[in-house]
Amino acid sequence: MHDQAQFYVGWGTLSLINAGLAQSKNRSGLLWWAASLFLGPLATLLIVILDKEPPPAV
């Protein structure tokens, strides 16, 4: 049971890290956080590969 809890804590931590990475590339942190809950490490790879979005025009 302890191993399963560590897995969920690690997966949740990864999703928060991915949200921060996404925000640093001008992408939606909330969207990438949710995607990371389902895709996990694959979402990390996608965030790293994708180019930085240009800042929104004001």
Image (spheres, helix red, strand yellow):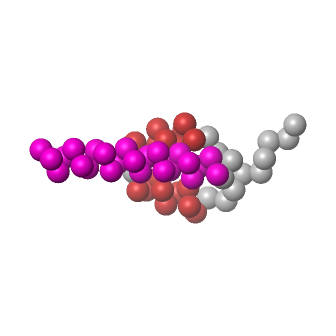
With respect to residue 6, does 49 lie above or below?
Answer: below
Q: Main secondary structure of the magenta part?
A: helix
Q: Residue 54: percent from the left, percent from the top?
A: 77, 51
The answer to whether residue 58 is seen in the rendering is: yes
At 55% from the left and 36% from the top, the residue drawn is: 30
Residue occupying the far left of the picture? 1
With respect to residue 58, does 52 lie above or below?
Answer: below
Q: Residue 28: percent from the left, percent from the top?
A: 61, 40
The answer to whether residue 39 is seen in the rendering is: no
Please tell me how many numbered marks the rendered image carries.
0
Location of the C terminus (image quadrant): top right
Residue occupying the far right of the picture? 58
Q: Image check: 54 left or right of 32?
A: right
Q: Report the magenta residues as a range.
A: 1-24
Location of the N terminus (image quadrant): top left
Q: Is residue 44 magenta?
A: no
Q: Residue 37: percent from the left, percent from the top?
A: 40, 42
Looking at the rendering, which quadrant does residue 51 occupy?
A: bottom right
At 19% from the left and 46% from the top, the residue drawn is: 4
Q: Is residue 7 magenta?
A: yes
Q: Residue 44: percent from the left, percent from the top?
A: 48, 56
In this view, the residue in front, 43 or 21, is 21
In this view, the residue in front, 35 or 4, is 4
Q: Image check: 37 left or right of 53?
A: left
At 31% from the left and 45% from the top, the residue drawn is: 9
Q: Image check: 2 left or right of 47?
A: left
